[in-house]
Amino acid sequence: MTADLSKDEVMNALRNFKTRRDDLLHEDADTFEHHLQRFIDFCRQNVVVQMVLEPLAKKLNPDVDTWLETTNQYNAKVSFPPDPDEEFILRYRITERAAQDEHLVISFGAARGQHKHDDWINYFRTIIIRPFVDELSHKLGEAANLASPEARAIQAVPLHRIPSPNEVKIFLSHKSVDKPIVYRYYEALKAVGFDPWLDEPNMAAGANLEREVLRGFNESCAAVFFITENFKDEKYLAAEVDYAVMQKRKKDKKFAIITLRYADAAPVPGLLTPYIYKNVSNDLEGFRELVRALPLELGSVRWKAEVV
Amino acid sequence: MNEEEQTSAEGMSDTPSDSTMRFDVSISTDRDHFLRRTCPACGQDFKTTVDPADFAWLLSEQIRRSGLEIGAVPLGEEEQAEPELHCPYCRNGSKSSEMHTEETIDYFKRFVYRECVVPMLNKTFSDLEDSIGHGHSSGGFLSISVNFEHQPIALMPRPIHGPDAPDMKIVQFLCCDKQMKINEWWNDVTECIYCNAKVVIV
């Protein structure tokens, strides 16, 4: 509702409203007239308050004169229209009228057996003004609509839950012939913010394959095995299975062995069977299972920098 | 959208017997259910989620400060120490009841005045009036005539708390799964304001 106003305008409006409201309700009865006039002036001039009052005041026009005439008879019942908005505007109009005519407060209290100045004022405050400013406070709270802070939410993560950069890689173990499938996983993991490790893009030319693979495992929090019809538990793949089991023993919950078994694939190697594996029918299903099984989670949702 | 939270405090004894009074206090939070706080050390505002026990402690503190010689203890809190909060800006640690805004404290003062102080004063004066209202004593040579009439102190309207705009950004603490709000420009959060765990903003 206040989307066109600056944050400062909204905050100042609420602050000034609360000060004037509390002065009107709680300051000494001797200064009541001053605070009443100050409050009414504020309501008429403030943009945020007018955003609440104006639409209702235009739509509803309660007969204040008749209400006062009826209510100010001796011991007459104080009743308001059943429609909450109409009651709200009627109270506002009566309060406005009281700022113009000091006798209104007196005659309202006197009609109900109040005999002293302070009692007249407290009675008028309690019966007429307080319900009005209470409802106005509520409506202003709703109207003070700043940009949603959910969009600005950030996370404060305990230090023990922050991994170092050299322990968050995701090792993708595969047969060379399955490279096209594994590349799709590699790209998808990178796109959502993870740090996948794949031999080709992660190894410099001339590097020692064994050592680089071992280093890749040491820096990983998960090893993913793609069991396709091409998979054979031998040579490099067998060594990678051994490395993965070693890492699991070493890192415990901070390391996951994730086995994705495609349709018509070879059996899962014996060393991997103690760990949960999933039969997957396509890459999307495999990716979902992989992300679910990772010991890492990414941050809260936020707008991209170029969008906002 | 402007949420009202209610809390209650019990433990105020209004007679020599162990009777208790129960108070229901309405507190206004912002649209996201956060309550504004002020650090007593640096004066900066931040917001926390609402814990009714906070208000019970604040209420009992205000009752004590009003000079009422009664032990007000939040309901069910006898065995528990009052929780501490740590300012996200200056890291000052204070009791949670000491980290309320001036507005909230004024509200509670008015509440206590209206709901405790005035009724007790009226009762005290009424009892006094009953006992010596039109007394006449003439023992020995001295004759004293006392005429005491009391007009009850009129109750002020009930105070109103809020409203508050949904400003500031939300910080989610993963250590204790609680949230707070801090100024937009502040990013140097290194400790959880609730459990004091070391944290980093990500």
Image (cartoon, grey):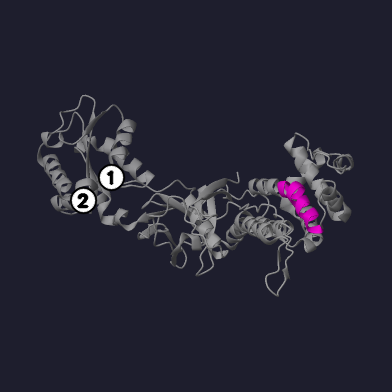
Name the chain letter of the residue that bears numbered label 2: A
Camera-side residue of B134 and A27: B134
Q: Earlier in the sequence, mark 2 or mark 1?
A: 2
- In the image, residue B48 lies at what x, y percent? 49, 54
Q: Is residue A259 left or right of residue B167?
A: left
Where is mark 1, residue-wise? A295
Which sits in the foreground, A244 or B125? Answer: B125
Q: Which numbered dot is residue A40? A: none
Determine the CA span between mark 2 and mark 1.
17 Å
At mark 2, the secondary structure is: helix
Tell me where residue A280 appears, x and y as whole percent. 27, 29
- Which residue in the rendered view is the most extreme toward the bottom? B141
**The magenta segment:** A117-132
User: Is B168 in front, or is A303?
Assistant: B168
Task: Work out whether disc 2 and disc 1 sit on a shared chain.
Answer: yes
Residue where numbered disc 2 is placed: A216
Q: Amino acid at mark 2?
A: Gly
Work out whether residue B181 or residue A174 is closer to the camera in this orientation and state it.
B181
Mark 1: amino acid: Pro
Q: Quadrant of residue A183?
A: top left
